[in-house]
Amino acid sequence: MKYYFAPLEGITGYLYRQAHYAFYPGLDRYYTPFLVPKEKKHLSTKERNDVMAEHNQGITVIPQIMSNQPDEFVRIAKVLHEEYGYQEINLNLGCPSKTVVSKKRGSGFLTVPEQLERFLTTVCNAMERDGMKLSVKTRIGKDKPEEFQRLLYIFAACPLSELIIHPRVQKDFYNNLPDLNVFSQAASIYEHMETELCYNGDIFQASDAQSLMARFPNLSAIMIGRGLLVNPRLVQEIKVRENGGSEERGEKTAVYQRFLNAEIEKEERKRRYALHRRLMDDYTLVLSSEKNVLFKMKELWLYMSQDFVQSQRYWKKIKKAQKLSELDNEVYALCTEQKLRDAIGRSELF
């Protein structure tokens, strides 16, 4: 099984990807937050920094583009291929933001299947001619799961390298449960195709991935977003179950045990704090003000704090911090005073 880190706008840029890889190696791919082509313009400075090779050393990165105009998509894809060396580009058909959807981008593009079909035909032909691969990350529709049957026919007719499905409709945002019955329709079709199939949605603990693999044994990959932000160690924990246990300090880790002993759990909390310090220092070097760094770190700790027991009061103080020193003190207190959860489920997220 391959494991991917889903793109999250504003969070999983190159500084976060490099820090995560340094502390928690083992993922197969990281996807960039989406790039939006601007008419007759190349990449912005921020976008160039995110995709340039020297900012992504040692890791496999797939750029993601969000567009409903084939010429724009192909133009930026060629820039990414010719100037930055990328062989595969991902199309974003999953973003549920209302401002994006209103422009028929992201999951809003799913509402015009005829236009989407023409777009994919044009883009696939152009990218194949230029020696590039196209993958797609999609939701199953805008309002109803029944919309996916038509969309699945369109995707199956295209020479995609991979189809990544988040089995929710746009109006769900991240509410309700992923529709595994609809996902199974795709699994049945892609079992007999060269295009790889990847699942995305609500993987928050190792048992979630284990259940998914048991139901879909021919799945090629799992993409995880919020679950990895909450618990950056999650893929390593999944692999323990997948492999029936792993060696840790010469002792066999129980398949269902998150930490072998209290010492290892404590060391993991130290690692979380070290990850925090690296990111805080890295952001300080590249962002223009302490206020911007505070915003970045608060956005991250909204997720990371949820992997600790009794974290609410710490999170409230982190959220109210006006200086980096105040935020750092609260993060240090959380990492030293509260243990990591035995497990975390979707219903426990705040």
Image: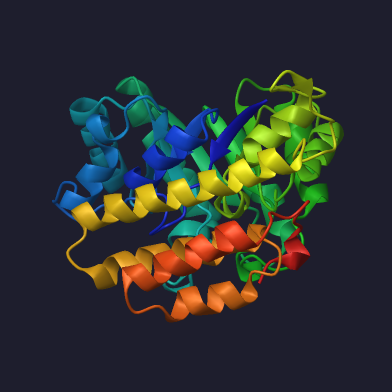
In the figure, is residue 297 to the left or right of 267?
Answer: left
Note whether 202 is above or below 5 in the view shown.
below
Give the mark count. Answer: 0
Picture coordinates of residue 184 (x, y %)? 80, 41
Residue nearest the viewer, comparing 248 with 98? 248
Quarter of the image with the C terminus is: bottom right
Q: Pick whichever, 4 or 73, lies toward us.
A: 4
> Would residue 66 be seen by someone viewing this image from the given angle?
no
**In percent of the image, x 42 and y 73: which residue is there?**
99
Residue pictured at 20% horizontal, 53% vertical: 286
Q: Quadrant of the N terminus?
A: top right
Is residue 216 visible in this depiction of the protein?
yes
Q: Is residue 137 left or right of residue 309?
A: left
Q: Quadrant of residue 296?
A: bottom left
Q: Which residue is drawn at the image coordinates 37% and 38% (left, top)? A: 18
Identified at 26% across, 24% down, the residue is 85
